[in-house]
Image: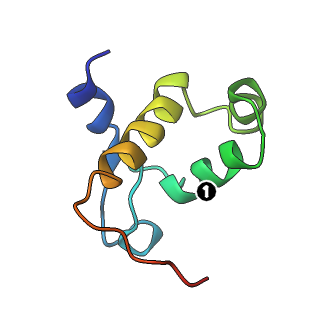
Amino acid sequence: MINRALLDRITVDPDICHGKPSIRGLRYPVEHILEFLASGMSNDEILSDFEDLELEDLQACLLFAAELSKVKTISKLVA
C-alpha cells in the first residue's frame, strides 16, 4: 500500500476523539496505538485486542508519526 493510501486512514474530526488524529473515523486515537507499540505490544496483540483494526491501520499510525517527525528543529518536550 502506498504512503498516501496509508495516510488516508488517519482522519481528524472535531466530533471524534476531540479532534485528535484517529484511525478511519473510529474512536482509536493514533497516540494510543503508538503508545501500545512503544510499550512492546506486537501488531498481533493489538489486532487481537481491537478486532476492527487492520494491520494497515497500525502501519498508518507509524507512517503518520514518521511524517510528524520531519521537522527542522526539535525542542525538549516536558511531560
Look at mark 1 in the image and give the residue it sits on: 32
- Give the percent coordinates (x, y) of residue 78: 56, 84
Q: Amino acid at mark 1?
A: His
- Give the percent coordinates (x, y) of residue 13: 30, 64
Is residue 29 in view? no
> Hey, which quadrant is residue 15 in on the image?
bottom left
Which residue is nearer to you in this view: 10 or 69? 69
Is residue 42 in view? yes
Q: Quadrant of the N terminus?
A: top left
Q: Classify 28 as above or below 48.
A: below
Furthest-bottom residue in this view = 78
Q: Quadrant of the C terminus?
A: bottom right
Furthest-top residue in this view = 1
Which residue is nearer to you in this view: 6 or 52? 6
User: What residue is at 28 percent from the left and 51 percent from the top?
Assistant: 70
Which residue is nearer to you in this view: 32 or 27? 32
User: What residue is at 46 percent from the left and 42 percent from the top?
Assistant: 61
